[in-house]
Image: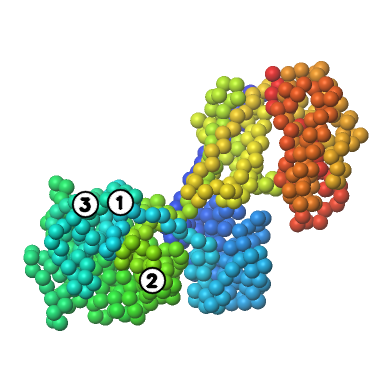
Amino acid sequence: MKLKNYIIACFAILISITTYAQYGSQKKADNLFNKFAFANAVEVYQELINKNYNAEYATRQLADSYAFMRNPDSAVVYYKKVVEQKNIPIAYYYNYAQALRGIKDYKESRKWLRKYKKEGGKINDLNFSKDQDFISSIFNAKQQYFLTDVKFNSKYADFGAYEHNGTIYFASSRDEGVSSKHIYGWNGEPFLDIYTTSNRTDSIVNHKSKLKGDVNTVYHEGPITITKDGKTMYFSRNDYNKNILGNDQNGITNLKIYKASLIDGEWTNIEELSFNNNQYSNGHPALSHDETKLYFASDMPGGYGGSDIYYVDIKEDGTYGTPQNAGSIINTNKNERFPFVNSEGVLFFSSDGHPGLGMLDIFGTVLDKNNNIVSVINLGVPVNSSKDDFSFFMNEDGISGFFASNRNGGVGGDDIYAYDRIPNLIIEGTVTDANSNEPVANALVTLKDIGGNKIADLVTDENGYYQINIDRDSNYILDTKKENYVDNTKNITSKGIKKSVTSITTNISLNPVSIEDIPIEELYPIYFDFNKYNIREDGTVELDRIVNLMTNVYPNMVIKIESHTDSRGPDAYNLILSQERAKATYDYLIKNGVDASRITEYKGYGEEKLTNKCDGTAKCTEEEHQLNRRTQFIVVKMK
């Protein structure tokens, strides 16, 4: 017995180590996915599938990743598996149709498009007809981002929001509270300055909130980017330095990029970067995550269009290389501006040259395994609109940030908008001993779909804690087992959960029992006729045995009753029918001498917990359906 317990304990520890490693892998993959690092995410999702850890979810993410990498051949393989999953969101029918179109299998694509429409899906037929846009169509098949209020917008221009160490920096022409304003003749508004605030809900941001130091002048400044250590800022400014305003040969003042140093809480020591030129504009600086490159927009000669995205290498000695054009995948014969690079090295930018919704739209790039840019994705509504959308910023979490737009409904000309991506939803909780309330370590928690199919095994840590990602708008079963404890089963739902909710807490209490005392094998299920809830004669035999066990053999035993139906008939009707079966079972036991206090619950589950494949998708015999029409008895307590 001791040897068996030792083996079980070692096995549980091994599962625990593996499970938490796999959960960590899933978090890593999701983080990479949200940050557009699809090539790296693919490898991790594939590992999770190989280990059968939350494999259906990983398959969906893998299919999308391949699609966004412009690899429809691989995307089709995994979308085919996805659409075979139960209760799959219909958006995946559309995604599969798009990927099939990407490999020019138009016949099969039309088939899945019809299925998508039949299930209530709506499409833009014009967009669907463009083969080259299939990845943007897939990305925008479901809304990726959701907008939240920003209170610090003004009636003037506000854009370029950039968050660093809890401070939000942005460019604004508000200059409110100042008696003498320097007016920009082009639009009749004050010139842009850099302002700061600590919260997106801060509604009082005025001249007292201007960036401290020497960055702001009487001309335009912004947007900015800051090094990780917070000591160096790169920013755009009109060609104005040391009180001298520069002009090109036509008398036009262009943009240049400068840098400043943070000294004693103020930004000073302003330096113009060496690659600027009086004859064209360089602006909108953005640092790569490793701070070895500085991206910017420029209309320098030799580009693809009006303004292009460029980058320069930042050398170890602090000097700069020669500006390099970011290439034709990014740049078009029109205008690309406002670059931003997230923590995974993914470049975002605005363009009016790529297919979009209106004027300037925001795009993300897609990298291959070698970090080469292979395509761009339009971020879609609500980030993009029919007007100008620009100055995209993403926080380190990959699911929140800012952008600006002059769309209708704003406060001023350009307004800042905050966005949030729907965060992953986890189920988490603590498993405790019902008597002592102490945590139960190394308990096996199995997440199942509503059909009873295993999704993943979890093992509680030393604090009895477990967690795993789950889908929204879905139903699950949590089975918890631990040696010397009574098994626990819970039904969990994520339906109706607000988009802002990131966690469902489900704590589990296990009742300790002695293995030698548990007569679980003696409590057999009873069965019912189709569409009936009366107790059959063969059922009375088993119920009489249970009455004898509870009144004479195990006088302290406490049970609960769970009743079920087969899959035939409407869900709502089956739930009522199963409850009637549970009540009939309960009434029989009480009538024949079992104290009502020793039955903690009698509950019907409808067709949620089928024991076999007979869920309506497979042909089954009457004998197979019979196995699902049952009442089961769960031992809750022995002493």
The numbered mark, 3 or 1, whose residue comes first in the sequence reads 1
448 w.r.t. 394: above or below: above
Farthest front residue?
Answer: 179
Identified by mark 1, the residue type is Ser
Q: Secondary structure at mark 3?
A: helix
Amino acid carrying mark 2 in the image? Lys
> Can residue 374 be seen here?
no
Q: In terms of secondary structure, where does tag 2 sit?
A: loop
Left or right? Give the position of 43 relative to 54: left
Badge 2 or badge 1: first in the primary sequence: 1
Residue 320: quarter of image: bottom left
State the image coordinates of residue 519 (x, y, percent, origin top left). Answer: 76, 25
3D distance between C-alphas at marks 2 and 3: 29 Å
User: Image quadrant for the C terminus?
Assistant: top right
**In the image, what residue type sits under mark 3?**
Ser
Residue located 67% across and 47% down the image? 450
Asked whether the residues under the numbered discs 3 and 1 touch, taking CB atoms below 8 Å apart as contact, a structural biologist would say no
Name the residue beneath numbered marker 2.
387
Which residue is the site of mark 1?
A: 203
